[in-house]
Structures are given as C-alpha cells and as structure tokens.
Amino acid sequence: MKPNYNYKNVAETYLFSNIAKKVNAYLAENPEKSVLRLGIGDVTLPLAPAVIEAMHEAVDEMGKKETFKGYGPEQGYAFLRESIQAYYARRGVTLSTDEIFVSDGAKSDCGNILDLFGTENSVLVPDPVYPVYVDTNVMAGRKISYMQATKENGFLPMPDEALKADIIYLCSPNNPTGAAYSKAQLKEWVDFAIANNAVILYDAAYECFVTDDAARSIFEVEGARKCAIELCSFSKTAGFTGTRCGYTVVPEELVFDGMSLRKMWLRRQTTKFNGVSYIVQKGAAAVFTEAGEKQIQDNLAYYRENAKLIAACMDECGIAYTGGKNSPYIWLQCPSGMTSWEFFDYLLKEIQVVGTPGSGFGRNGEGFFRLTAFGSRETTIEACKRMKALLKK
Ligand code: MLT
C-alpha cells in the first residue's frame, strides 16, 4: 500500500484545530484564567424555537410506525428542496428542485465536490482564503494559483488574463476578510469563467449577512448557470454548526465534454452519502416558515450588533479593519507591526482573548487578524473592554 503522499504537502493540523490546541495548552497552564473565544466562526445562540418545534415533531413521527422514516430521498426531502427553491425565487433566481442537493454542510460539499473534477485541472483561489479550498486540493494533488486579495483592491480580486484556471473559488461575503462582491463584479467573473471554460465554486455560506446590494447568490448574475456551482449552509444563517445541514446548487447547464456535472454530483452523492436525517431536514425547513424567518433575523441582528461593538472598539483603539458590515467577521491589521501569530499570543497571554491569525488564511493574511461576531453579547462586551484596556493608545 502507498499512502496519499499529497498529505505531506498540507500543514499537520487544520487551522482551527491548531488554535484550539494552543488555547487548551494555555488553559492547562493557567486554569484560573477566563478565555474569551472569538476565533472560530461558531455560533452561540440556540436554535430558533420554530426549528426546535419542527424537530420535536419529527422525532415524534420517527417514534410511530405510521410516520416512521428510513432512508430519505437521495437529494433531500422535497419539502426542504422546495423551501430552498422558494427562498431563491424571492430573490428572483429560478432553480429546479433537481438542481438542489441537501447535505450535512458546506464544508463537506466543498471538499466532496472535487470528485467531479480531474486532478489535472488547475485551481485559482484568493489569498487570503478559507483554508479548506486549498487543503482539499492539495490533498488531491492539484496545482493551485493564488489571486491577491489586498487592502488595495478591497480584498476583492478581479479576473486577470494572466491568471487562468479551470476551477475558480469565490467566497462572498468573504471569509476571512468580510468583503462582498457586487453583482457587477461577479458578472466579470462569470464572463471570465465562461470565456475560459472554467467552473466557479461559489461559497455563499455568509449570504445572510449581506445588508446592502451586494450579491447574495451568484445566480443573481446573468450567465452564472453556465459556469457556477453554489455552496450554502444553515450553519451561519440559522445556527446549525452543531446540527449540520447545507445545500449545493448544481445547474443543468453545467455540461463539460458531454458530461453533466449535475448528474455526476447525483451519482456521487447517491454512492457515497446517505443523506441528512429527517429530523434535521425538518428543522432546516422550519427556517423558511414565517415564524422561523423572523426568529432567524432576530438572531442575525444580535450578531450584527456584536460586529458593531467590535468595530467601535477597533475605532477607539485606532486599529484599521474591514468587514463587520456584510459579514460576521472583523478583519483587522495587527497593531505595532506584529505578525498574526505574535498578536494571537499577545492577546491570549495578556487578556485571554482568542482570535484567528490572518496568516492561517494565506500569505496575504500575514499581519492581519480575524475576530468573529458570533460570540455571546457578554463575551463580546468583555473582550472589547479588555482589548480597549490593552490596545488603546
Ligand atoms: C471559520 O471560522 O472560518 C468557520 O467557522 C469555519 C467553517 O465554517 O468551517
């Protein structure tokens, strides 16, 4: 047996596992300290009452012979796919339910979708970037090029004739920078992808945070059905990080060398995946009910307020940042020329605030740091208080 040698080319630990390990080591040495976690983008508010109610009902159904369910429909239950279809329709996007695939989250789909593409394809990712795009391709042995996302271009790189690739990753609103593409900017990407016979893998996991007229789905852009796959999730929208549910949209039009990516994805999923539990899909569908939507919006408003508090704290400290507007992330420049990990250690040791070092997202992330607005209000307020005391000049 020969192992997959490509694993030699990825960092030994995943970014967020590495951070958790460092924090645990610090706590083992300093058990009396209270650590405030604003690192991983994990939600803290409980599931919405409408979701819980739907899941309770589903549990009861599973306990009765007449309503018990075994394996579900392969792409997800029709009730959930129809709700997702209607959600897109409200934004003027027409999808067929055959193009919607329910999964256990955008992260898994983001890695699994690569089964559809030959390893000889070249890949283009922004730098900085959600590490999963890079690691999953490195594990498969694909060649990766980077497009520069910098302060100068507002962390929104645009197509460049000198940087062509077969698979292009876009994440908007962006993790980690919080920058969001406008529809006009996405149109340039769509035209570029079509002209170069490329596929865009569009990560829309943070679309629910868009508050201005930035795009929420790449399918709001004309032509996108010919070149894009969209990955989305209930994690950030409805607090499903621990419950697990997401969906991927693969349009009919994606046919390359006579092969339909939609049909291939169906084939892949039916072979390697047995679906998301009925109970979880019931809970996810409740997100789109009137009561569910209202409750979800209340939760999002809570996180947006946290983002404002962190942004105000940065303003007071004189620290430059982006994000926090269409995004739950504040992307800040480390003060005093510190590197990302130096700043991480400094905050952890001095005030026990945990964030995510920007360099963990790529070379251009060096010297930057990400704070999340997904903490509780108490944690956010206390972290801001401690940061002000430490960083205010
Ligand atoms: C993050 O902190 O970047 C996210 O929580 C990671 C994820 O969604 O998998």
Image: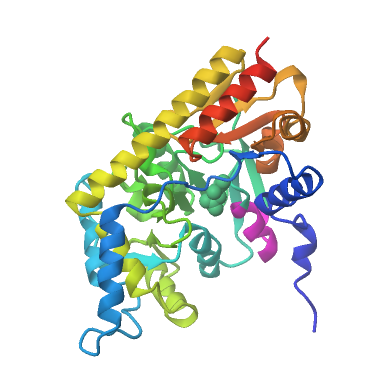
Q: Quadrant of residue 143?
A: bottom right
Front residue of this view, candidates 15 and 153:
15
Q: Is residue 214 left or right of residue 391?
A: left
Quarter placement of the N terminus: bottom right
Q: Is residue 155 visible?
A: no
Quarter placement of the C terminus: top right
On screen, residue 267 above or below 91: below
Q: Is residue 327 left or right of residue 56?
A: right
Q: Position of residue 322 (x, y in %)?
A: 53, 25
Q: Is residue 122 magenta?
A: no
Q: Position of residue 258 (x, y in %)?
A: 41, 71
Q: Is residue 213 visible?
A: yes
The residue furthest front is 32
Q: Position of residue 136 (x, y in %)?
A: 63, 60
Q: Position of residue 226 (x, y in %)?
A: 36, 54
Tell me which segment is drawn in magenta: 132-143
Circle count: 0
Q: Is residue 135 magenta?
A: yes
Residue located 32% across and 67% down the image: 281
Front residue of this view, candidates 84 and 256:
84
On screen, residue 34 above or below 276: above
The residue furthest top is 393
Front residue of this view, candidates 268 and 384:
384
Front residue of this view, candidates 345 and 101:
345
Q: Of helix, strand and loop, which mostly describes the magenta segment?
A: helix
Residue located 45% across and 50% down the image: 202
Residue located 38% across and 43% down the image: 207
Q: Quadrant of residue 129?
A: top right
